Structures are given as C-alpha cells and as structure tokens.
Image: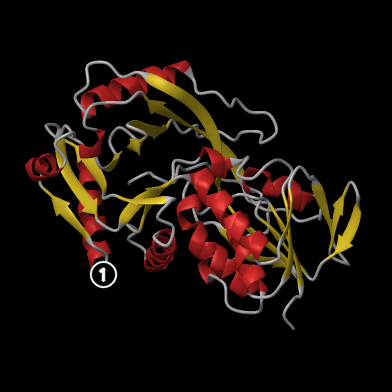
Amino acid sequence: MEPSTVAVVGAGAIGVTATAALATRGADVTLYERGSLAAGSSGRAAGVCYDAFADRTDARIATRSLERFRELPDVFTELPYVWLARSGDEKRANAIRTQSRRMRELGLDVSLVAPDDLHDRFPGLVTDDVAVAAIARGAGYAETENYVETIAERAARNGASIRTETSVEIATDPLQILAEDGKRSFDAVLVAGGAHSKRILDTAGVSIPLKPYRVQALVTDPIPNSETVPMCFDATGDYYFRPHTGGLLVGDGTERVESDPEHWKRDADEVFVRQTRERIAERVRQDEIGVREAWAGLCTATPDGDPLVGEIRPGLFVATGFHGHGFMRSPALGERITDEILGGDGVRRFDPTRFDGSETFEIVAGMDIE
C-alpha cells in the first residue's frame, strides 16, 4: 500500500525536489529542516550541471535532470561544459579520449575538440598547454539557492508543510519524527540531510558508510569577456570554473580527510585562494584576478563512489553520498526516490542496503579523472 504520510528531513536540492514530487502525487508530506532552505551543501554548491557521464545509469539520470532544469529558465543557463588535460598528462588525456567515446556510444552530444578549435569557439580560454579536450553541449549551470527556493514554493503550493528551524530525530517501530513540539508518526521517512544524514540516521539506530569532506570555492571580481569562457574542468590542475555575475565561480580544493559536519571551517583557506587566483590568471589571460568572496562546503563520500539512494529499513529511506554531484542530479533523483517511496522502482545500483554501515574506506573526490 502506498504511504499517505511522508516526512522528508533536509531542505537541500534533493529534499525539496522529493517533497514537491510527493505533494504533486497526493501524499501528505512534511519537510523538516533544522536551519533555513538551502542552508547546507546545496546553498554552497557550484551549480554546474552536465550529462557527460560514461556510465549508462549516471548518464540517464543526468539527462533527465537537465530536462527538468531547462523548465526553469530563471534558474538555469545553458552553456557547454569542457574538460581538458594538459600536455604531459597522458593518463588523464587517455581517460578523456576513452570517456568521450563511451559517452557518444550512449548518444550524448559529446566530442573531442582540438585546442585551436576550442580557442576559436571560446576566445577567452587559454589553450596553449592543452593536450586533449572534450566538450559536452548538453550542459549548463543553475543558481542553487534559487532552485531550492523555487521548488520549495512549488511544494508548498501543492500542499506540503515546510518546517524550517526545526531539529528532529527519528524513531522506529513505529516510524516517528521527534521534534521539540512533539512527535508524529509517518508511513515513510526520507533522510536527505547531506553531511548530517549519518547523524540523523544514527538516532534511528541505522548506520551508513558516509564521510563528509570539505571542498572550497571562490567567486572572482568581474573579468573582461567572461561570456567567452565555457564551464571548464582542468583535470590536470583538479579545478573547475563557470561564469558567475560577470566573473567566474572557481572551485574544488578537495580535502581527502573526513570532516565533522557540526564543526568545520566554513571559510576558504588562504592557500586555496592564492593558488586559485594564479590558476585562473593563466587559464583566462588575466594579469590580476580579484576575489569577491570565498567559502568552503561539505560533500559526502561512500565506499564505492555511488550514492546511497533508496529504502534502508522498512519505510525508512535515504538520499545522500553524492561525491559532489548531488545538486546536478537532484531533479531526477528526487523523482526516483519519490517513485520508490510510493511503491515503484528505485535505482538498483544506488541501493543503500549494499552496505552494512561498518565499512572503512578512503575518500575519493567525485570529479577525479583516472
């Protein structure tokens, strides 16, 4: 029997998308968030969105997400995505060649592009040191807070109750949400709390293998001709950028150590800011790069690099562990977890019960090209 009452814990991109989808399909759904909308990782995400995945499941999810993003022109901007390897980096150059071929086999609009041709198309981009580059035309970027707020408004219009500034715990047998103002039973509960998902599930006696890790980003001052620059990932340098309000949003700075989601440094490191300014000055031909703001956020890692999305105990669902790819896949995965909650199929490969929660593992960043 389909659940009639559903609680969603976490008002990031996945949480609000699932809440809106559940409300649209007639569920009595309540969204709980201990802070404000997009207060966690979603509000600090870069908003880069593409379907350039060499795996069929990942590509299908990303393609569906892009379809949904394009329905929001006030939130989403179409722009090609370029990823490149520099001269001398044969390992990543070969990986890009292989990836682009497999992506084309999946029907994606992806191709290799010669450095000179890349510069002709995007004259603001320096390509003198590029050995191999690929371009994905089905891509763009979204303003992350705008997305969360827009979808949350849609959820509320369809009858969802949204409770921000509300910390909760979960009880099982029966399945309940415990808040300061009391407890309430639900037919199903979805935990989409990002880096806090492990702690939230711990309150229900459920363990998951999840490690939050810190990433960093900054926004530059306006630069001339920023419109002639694509979204780009320099695989050799291990950083990405995309246009943002006349300048560039630049990120990565991944720390491959576990962070405490309650106590972590939210400001960017001085070393990251300095190195990033130097990198961008070389890639977009600017003598001096000013920095408007810089920050850190938390991503979440799992043992195999795939997220935990699905039912982990009867009536208890989870959606976390996205290795930095959560926001870009949130429209599709929000739909898929809704389908599963309402009795349909989930994503088998992402089934959280493939782990027992006791696994040990090393953090691997989601954008690595090996």
* Corner quadrant of residue 217: top left
Q: Quadrant of the N terminus?
A: bottom right
Q: Nearer the viewer, residue 3 or 209?
A: 3
In the rendered image, the vertical position of residue 33 relative to residue 21, given as above or below = above
In the rendered image, the vertical position of residue 186 relative to residue 282, given as above or below = below
Please provide percent x and percent y for residue 253: 43, 30
* Corner quadrant of residue 51: bottom left
Instruction: Give me the residue at 49% from left, 41% from top.
Output: 45
Instruction: Give me the residue at 16% from left, 53% from top.
Output: 112
Q: Nearer the viewer, residue 370 or 32?
A: 32
Please provide percent x and percent y for residue 145: 53, 44
Give, as a three-letter code, the residue at label 1: Gly
Which residue is the extreme one toward the right?
182
Does 111 sit left or right of 74 as displayed?
Answer: left
Residue 322 visible to the viewer: no
Please provide percent x and percent y for residue 105: 24, 69
Please provide percent x and percent y for residue 132: 16, 44
In the rendered image, the vertical position of residue 348 relative to residue 369, given as above or below = below
- Color style of the picture: secondary structure
* Corner quadrant of residue 357: bottom right
Instruction: Give me the residue at 51% from left, 51% from top.
Output: 147
Does 54 sit left or right of 84 as displayed?
Answer: right
Secondary element type, mark 1: loop
Does 30 sit left or right of 144 as displayed?
Answer: right
Residue 178 visible to the viewer: yes
Q: How many marks?
A: 1
Characterize the local packing of mark 1: few (<14), some (14-19) or many (20 or more) Cα atoms within 10 angstroms: few
Q: Which residue is mark 1?
A: 107
In the rendered image, the vertical position of residue 111 relative to residue 336, given as above or below = above
Does 136 sit left or right of 325 as displayed?
Answer: left
